[in-house]
Image (cartoon, rainbow, N blue to C red):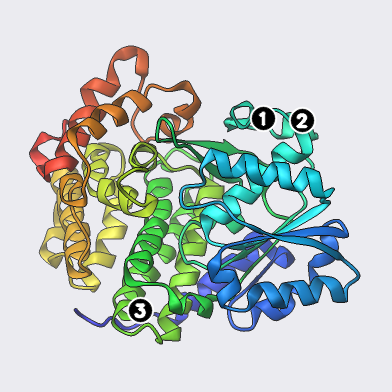
Amino acid sequence: MRENSLDKSLMKKAEDLLIEFKGDDYAFGAGALKRVDRYVDRIGRKTAIITSGTGIRAGIVDFVRSSLEGRGHEVLGVLDGARQNTPKEDVYRLAYQLVKMGCEGVVAVGGGSVIDGAKAALVLALYGGVVEDYFGTGLVSAKSGGERIPLIAIQTASSSASHLTKYSNVTDMVTLQKKLIIDEAIVPKASIFQYDVTKSMPPDLTKDGALDGISHCWEVWMGAARRANYGKISEVAYAGIKLIIEALPRALKNTEDLEARYALGLGTDLGGYSIMLGGTSGPHLGSFSLVDVLPHGRACAILNPYYTILFSSAIQGQLKIVARIYVENGYMDEGKMSLKGRKLAEAVAEGMVNFYRRIGFPVTLKEAGATEKHIEKMVSASKDPQLKSKLENMPIPIRVEAGDIDRLIKPTLEAAYIGDFSLIPSP
């Protein structure tokens, strides 16, 4: 595996972008956990900690409890956070516990599922109803008047950037379908991510999380051409993708490479900035139907090369820029930079696939363990009105009523299943 050098000037740029994004609401990088004291008074005095094994093993929960109590907070309990993919049942359990305890605020310590679960549970505890009431965009604010939930999020995994965003993914474990709460009211009141805590992450989790970060950046960037903030999205997404591609091989080679871990943290956090500037599209939409066989980040990453080709006519500017990253890191031939149209998209998609192979990552849905029935499920979910935001974010028009799902999305998913670019239609 090639060991890439890290672009130090780009790392500094990423730090500046994150400060621009979150300001005083976010402590990140070396020693960030020591800054928890500055945030605890943003939530109520009767506090619960929602966490996973990582938060306990790393000593973060004990540190947070001490900080809360030192500021006069009553820690009502330490609750087990939501499991992977945030099952709906875990959200209801947590909401019940928060109500029963009379909780006024939460500190969530864990990865994306733990933080997503804390967001959704707080919504139910505060505003009642069932979780389905809030799937979609802006439905929490309709109840809260826009007030943000009393949550401090402490991230422990370079992946979802849930600690920075307005999203909460929740899974119905009966139908094995994931859906989204999207609302500014569920952005945590403060966030912390000390990047070196990720050094204990196993290799597969490191890969899935890093590639989820790339997916956030690339999907938003692909759909940004007509947006007024295209320049800012390009700046943020480019930096995030480049940092992750440079850092991931090093982090996999040496788990104690703290510089690589720092760069991964910056890159995936810029993925969070990206999805607050724009929105994800096809790969994320497909991933919601694969929760029974694939981690979220893995599903998104596998689908991205294929959607890149489908969207080729609308993303030529983005392709020219991102291609340079794959060339510089040895995953794409420089001569292919002169290509245009679909051929350029195929070259970039090949660069993505080469990167995946270099890090030992699957490149097709079939290789990853999905089945043809999952294709049917993804096609059906693409027509669900509660997931229409993903269609709206696509860089080409996708209209359910015009039959575009069966004409465009289905063959693209079939291409991803077996790895055949030729199956992808040209809109």
Tell me, yes or no, whether the two marked residues, 3 and 2, touch with CB atoms within 8 Å.
no
Residue under the point 46% across and 63% down:
268
Earlier in the chain: of badge 1 and badge 3, it is 1
Q: Nearer the viewer, residue 75 or 265?
A: 75
Earlier in the chain: of badge 3 and badge 2, it is 2
Tell me, yes or no, whether the two marked residues, 1 and 2, touch with CB atoms within 8 Å.
yes
Q: CA distance from mark 3 to mark 2?
A: 43 Å
Describe residue 187's horizontal placement relative to residue 300 as left or right. right
Q: CA distance from mark 1 to mark 2?
A: 7 Å
Q: Secondary structure at mark 3?
A: helix
- Can you give x and y, in whole percent of width and height, for residue 266 in the image? 50, 70
Q: Secondary structure at mark 2?
A: helix
Kind of residue at disc 2: Lys
Kind of residue at disc 3: Ala
Q: Nearer the viewer, residue 311 or 2?
A: 2
Tell me, yes or no, whether the two marked residues, 1 and 3, touch with CB atoms within 8 Å.
no
Relative vertical location of residue 212 with respect to residue 278 in this rendering, above or below: below
User: Which of the numbered marks, if any, corresponds to residue 143?
Assistant: 2
User: Which of the numbered marks, if any, corresponds to residue 251?
Assistant: 3
Where is residue 115, by image quadrant? bottom right
Kind of residue at disc 1: Leu
Q: How many marks?
A: 3
**Pointer 1 local density, CA inside 10 Å: few below 14, some 14–19, many at least 20:** some
Residue under the point 77% across and 34% down:
127
Label 1 sits on residue: 139
**Pointer 3 local density, CA inside 10 Å: few below 14, some 14–19, many at least 20:** many
Relative vertical location of residue 254 with respect to residue 247 in this rendering, above or below: below
Residue 158 visible? The answer is: yes
Where is residue 284, by image quadrant? top left
